[in-house]
Image (tube, grey):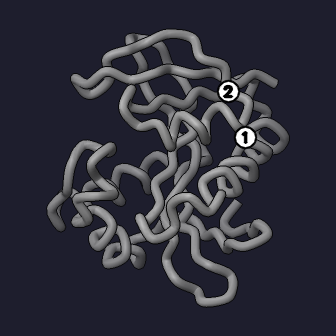
Amino acid sequence: METFFTDRLLAERLQFQHLNELHYMHQDAQVMATLGGVRSDQETRLFIFNNLHHWQRYGFGLWVFRDKISNEFVGRAGLRQTDVEGHDEVELAYALMAKFWGKGLATEMSEKILKIGFDLLGLQDIVCFTLTTNLASKRVIEKLGFKYEYDIIYADLPHLFYRLKV
């Protein structure tokens, strides 16, 4: 699925043309505080390259989201195949620019992405995890219906691990 929309957002499949917007996001210390820290231009290029490869390999990945009215870059979200403690999982991942926090947009993006994952891709379960200190993300995850399973160490940091089943 190349593009789709929600009530307030337009989504398009992540491409190299989004480099400047993602670089801007990846340079924002507030946004990146829970995502491994700020990234250089080269790291952002590698992030895009890896995500394009993911799309080719798995047929799904990340989308870039824009405000329907202003066309302003809101963030990115999607589904990613990932290894969690030796297990292959499909993860719901999202990140928003700070000015869009607290407006329900992470939930709005995620609801649509979960529908795509379950209804179109036929996934049986999707996982989501967040730093133990990221209470806003924890609220989004629980609002979406994910169930806490256990604490994990991911990227050398403590995370809460959740799962949502069909």
Q: Position of residue 97 (x, y in %)?
A: 43, 66
Label 1, secondary structure: give it.
helix
Residue type pointed to by label 1:
Gly
Crowd tier of the residue under label 1, counting other residues whose Cα lies within 10 Å: few below 14, some 14–19, many 20 or above: many
Residue displayed at 15% across by 62% down:
40
Q: Is 163 above or below relative to 49?
A: above
* Observer-nearest of 47 and 49: 47
Label 2, secondary structure: give it.
loop
Q: Is 130 above or below relative to 64?
A: above
Q: Quadrant of residue 149?
A: top right
Query: Closer to the camera: disc 1 or disc 2?
Result: 2
Q: Quadrant of residue 152?
A: top left
* Quarter of the N terminus within the rendering: bottom right
Q: Which mark is residue 146?
A: 2
Reading the image, the residue beneath label 1 is 117
Image-based side of 120 in relation to 104, left or right = right
Q: Which mark is residue 58?
A: none
Q: Position of residue 18 (x, y in %)?
A: 41, 74
Q: Quadrant of residue 68?
A: bottom right
Image-based side of 49 in relation to 165, left or right = left
Image-based side of 108 in relation to 155, left or right = right
Residue displayed at 72% across by 40% down:
117
Residue displayed at 45% across by 71% down:
99
Q: Is 98 above or below relative to 10?
A: above
Residue type pointed to by label 2:
Phe
* Observer-nearest of 12 and 160: 160
Image-based side of 28 in relation to 103, left or right = left
